[in-house]
Image (spheres, grey):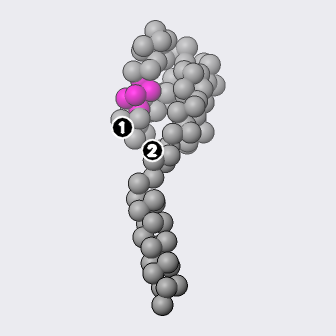
């Protein structure tokens, strides 16, 4: 979460936006934005999404868990096991 917060902060700074501007546009307090930029897990995912939308990064949400290597390996292992047992 800390890395996510840092990325959000850097995105805000690259756009030359103040914390006041982003928090106002996202409809949140400045202290909530500060918590987001610190990677606080206590802030709801919806609030993170609002800030990403303000920064024009809402499509980044679609990347979450998009490359699920562990899930794919588990699924592949299950498929191999089920195919192996049907050959008997």
Which of disc 1 and disc 2 is earlier in sequence?
Answer: 1
The image position of residue 6, as x and y in percent, is: 37, 29
Magenta extent:
5-9
Residue plotted at (49% across, 85% down): 87
Residue plotted at (47% across, 12% down): 15
Find disc 1 in the rendering and name its residue: 2
Of marks 2 and 1, the one in the foreground: 1
Whether residue 8 appears in magenta in the rendering, the answer is yes
Can I make out residue 85 in this image?
A: yes
Find disc 2 in the rendering and name its residue: 41
Which residue is more in the foreground, 57 or 25?
A: 57
The image position of residue 65, as x and y in percent, is: 49, 48
Magenta-colored segment: predominant secondary structure: helix
Q: Quadrant of the N terminus?
A: top left
Looking at the image, residue 86 lies above or below residue 28: below
Q: Is residue 44 left or right of residue 13?
A: right
Circle 2 SS class = loop
Count of residue discs? 2
The image position of residue 81, as x and y in percent, is: 45, 78
The image position of residue 63, as x and y in percent, is: 51, 39
Circle 1 SS class = helix
Looking at the image, residue 83 lies above or below residue 50: below
Pointer 1 local density, CA inside 10 Å: few below 14, some 14–19, many at least 20: some
Q: Which mark is residue 42?
A: none
Q: Residue 41 occupies which quadrant of the picture?
A: top left
């Amino acid at each position: 979460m800390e890395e996510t917060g840092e990325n959000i902060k850097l995105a805000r700074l690259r756009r030359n936006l103040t914390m006041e501007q982003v928090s106002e546009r996202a409809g949140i307090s400045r202290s909530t934005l500060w918590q987001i930029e610190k990677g606080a897990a206590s802030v709801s995912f919806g609030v993170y999404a609002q800030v990403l939308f303000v920064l024009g990064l809402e499509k980044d949400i679609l990347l979450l868990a998009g490359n699920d290597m562990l899930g794919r390996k588990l699924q592949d292992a299950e498929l191999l096991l089920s195919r192996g047992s049907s050959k008997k």
